[in-house]
Amino acid sequence: MDTRSKVDEALLLLNKILDYIFLYFFLLLFAMMALTWSLTGSLLYFVLPPKVSRRIGPALVTGFARRYIALLSAGGKVKFDLAELDALQGEAGGLVIAPNHPSMLDAVMIVSRLPRVVCIAKAQLWDNPLLGGGMRMAGYIRNDAPVKLTKLAAARLEEGQQLLLFPEGTRTTRRPVNGFRGGFALTAKLAGVPVQTVFIEASSPFLGKGWPLFKKPDFPVVYRVRLGRRFKVEGEVKPFIAALERYFRDELSGAAAASRSLVLP
């Protein structure tokens, strides 16, 4: 083997090692920031009056999420194009934000740009020491009683907050999207607010459903978030859900080939 081949092999090995170092840093950083967020949120939740806590909580969560995204971007191995979300920041009135759900980073990306967003959290996440305190501080809604959940969510929308709801209910397992559940549409109809569709495109299935936590992707991983059409839920909910699912399938099927070659500067 000539000298040049040995150098090339050494560089490939070094790059692979650096990729793994970044991956573990990526996961450790999330755990550390989530724990800090949860501890801070728990303290403020019990100290501050509920109205004050709910007012500053979402902005606090956005601050943590924005810093996490910025630190990942600085490493150069994960790139984000989230600029289209900024158009939703200054809007008055309630709004259901309905994205597809390809990865564990989806909520972090959206919350990092939208300080008025309230999420619905699964009960097991609500009880998680890394996340629960921050969720309480932010005024997020616990998903453990469907009827109560829908009423609470509709009340928040009527107050003018934005509600993040994934129509699939969980991360995507069947591309381009899983079958849609009805909660997001029923909530929007009860509150009389529109549904803003959001499309999340990724160059890798990294951190998708079934992706092993410590499996290294091919870096760089690129995420792009774009806004779709906005819909009013009128008439029966079931036909609306079916039509919206078709809309997502058409949009994401067309974007699937392009997402594999996503490149950001």
Image (spheres, grey):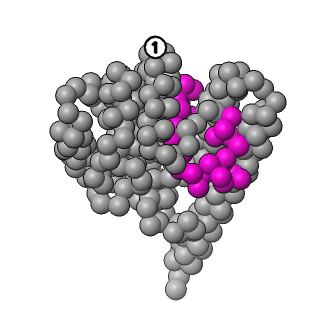
Q: Position of residue 41 (x, y in %)?
A: 73, 37
Q: Position of residue 142 (x, y in %)?
A: 56, 43
Please indicate whether residue 84 sits to the left or right of residue 10 in the image. Answer: left
Q: Range of the magenta residues?
A: 110-137
Q: Is residue 153 above or below residue 128?
A: above
Q: Is residue 112 magenta?
A: yes
Q: Position of residue 126 (x, y in %)?
A: 62, 48
Please indicate whether residue 105 sits to the left or right of residue 42 in the image. Answer: left
Residue count near mark 1 (Cα–Cα under 10 Å), binned few <14, some 14–19, many ≥20: few
Query: Mark 1 belongs to which amino acid?
Result: Ala
Q: Is residue 44 above or below residue 86?
A: below
* Secondary structure at numbered mark 1: loop
Which residue: 27% across, 24% down? 232
**Residue under numbered circle 1:** 92
Please indicate whether residue 238 sits to the left or right of residue 1 in the image. Answer: left
Q: Is residue 83 above or below residue 141?
A: above
Which residue: 44% across, 67% down? 210
